[in-house]
Amino acid sequence: MIPFNKPCVTGNEITAIEDALSQNKISGNGLYDRKCMNWLEENLDCAKALLTPSCTAALEMTALLLNIKEGDEVIMPSYTFVSTANAYALQGAHIRFVDIEQDTMNISALAIENAITNKTKAIVVVHYAGIACDMDAVMEIAKDHGLYVIEDAAQALMTTYKGRQLGTIGHFGTFSFHDTKNITCGEGGALIINDRSFIERAEIIQEKGTNRNQFVRGEVDKYTWRDIGSSYLISDLTAAYLFVQLQHVEQITNNRLEIWNSYARKLRDLEISGHISLPRISSECKHNAHMFYIKTNNREALMDYLKEKGITAKTHYVPLHEAYAGEKYGSFAGTDKHTTKESGKLVRLPLYYGLKEQDVAYVVNHLYEFFKV
């Protein structure tokens, strides 16, 4: 059996967790929490990084920071995970789902432009498969219309666009450290703040609406309830696991890139013969090999065949505008030219840290057998 994913383990995580236990503080904003935040700020070159329980929580914080309310509209791709929409629907926003680009499965800048109304408050882009959206076009549109940009970079840690780290280009960036992600701690996320005017309030929202962070730093003599908020904190035990992963980010990324590139080389003839299409990587993007997918018109039969051969492949998102809640809390703006059609072709192949070359070859060989090439 070849699983679709195995959570990444480098071998040193237990040692870090034991060290965290010895600090006599395992709740949020502990030693390893600060180590991770410092690592993110230094390596991403962002104004502020806050660890959160999930990327979902980080997205919810952006909705609170932007004072999203009933009557506001937020533009995003329909082809994304439900958390991208939930964060803003929870605050009463109407979601304007728009189309994607056929080649990258990323949001279409033209579709964004056409979906803007006088109620639009923000644009949420999703860097699908760890591959950058056209951020120059997105930021220009946002500037022209006075809109905020949130980068849902859940899959895109250590991916760059024109040399800039994803998550640091918009007003906010959000990352996931779920066990399906390249860098993981089981459940976890991060909010990246690129506009310094939001930092103080973000710290308050993260700490249940209190100024506890200022108290801990000795800036106030007691902390009190200052704003709305919630417990958007991560356990220091979880942060300890994450910190080890961050220290090995280059090793993990390089290993995944080797696997990704092996798939791409070996499957090129299947694309040339017209049986599948492969991911497209812009020359402006340096990606992180988050996933390797193919697209085929024979998806269901292929999935059944791979399962018979002990290979766990996966489809991905059902477009949100087609879901019950998507119809209730949002609507599709413009024409669904690519979203439904392309999402119905997509198959994700096994890819995880430590996947063996012989396993890649096994998957590839069975793809050729299925297509009889």
Image (spheres, rainbow, N blue to C red):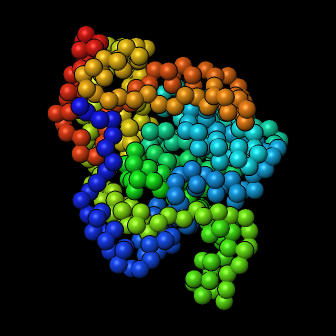
Examine the rendering and report whether any part of residue 111 can be seen: no
Q: How many marks?
A: 0
Q: Quadrant of the N terminus?
A: top left
**Residue at 67%, 22% in the rendered image:** 335
Q: Please provide percent x and percent y for residue 296.
A: 41, 18
Q: Residue at the left extreme?
A: 358
**Residue at 71%, 43% in the rendered image:** 89
Q: Please provide percent x and percent y for residue 103.
A: 48, 28
Whether residue 261 sits left or right of residue 182 in the image: it is: left
**Residue at 28%, 64% in the rendered image:** 14
Q: Please provide percent x and percent y for residue 160.
A: 45, 50
Which residue occupies the foreground of this view, 307 or 287?
A: 307
Which quadrant holds residue 307? top left
Which quadrant holds residue 321? top right
Q: With respect to residue 52, does 118 lie above or below?
A: above
Examine the rendering and report whether any part of residue 329 can be seen: yes
**Residue at 27%, 20% in the rendered image:** 308
Q: With respect to residue 152, does 224 lie above or below?
A: below
Which residue occupies the foreground of this view, 341 or 210?
A: 210
Whether residue 112 sits left or right of residue 216 in the image: it is: right
Q: Please provide percent x and percent y for residue 120.
A: 77, 43
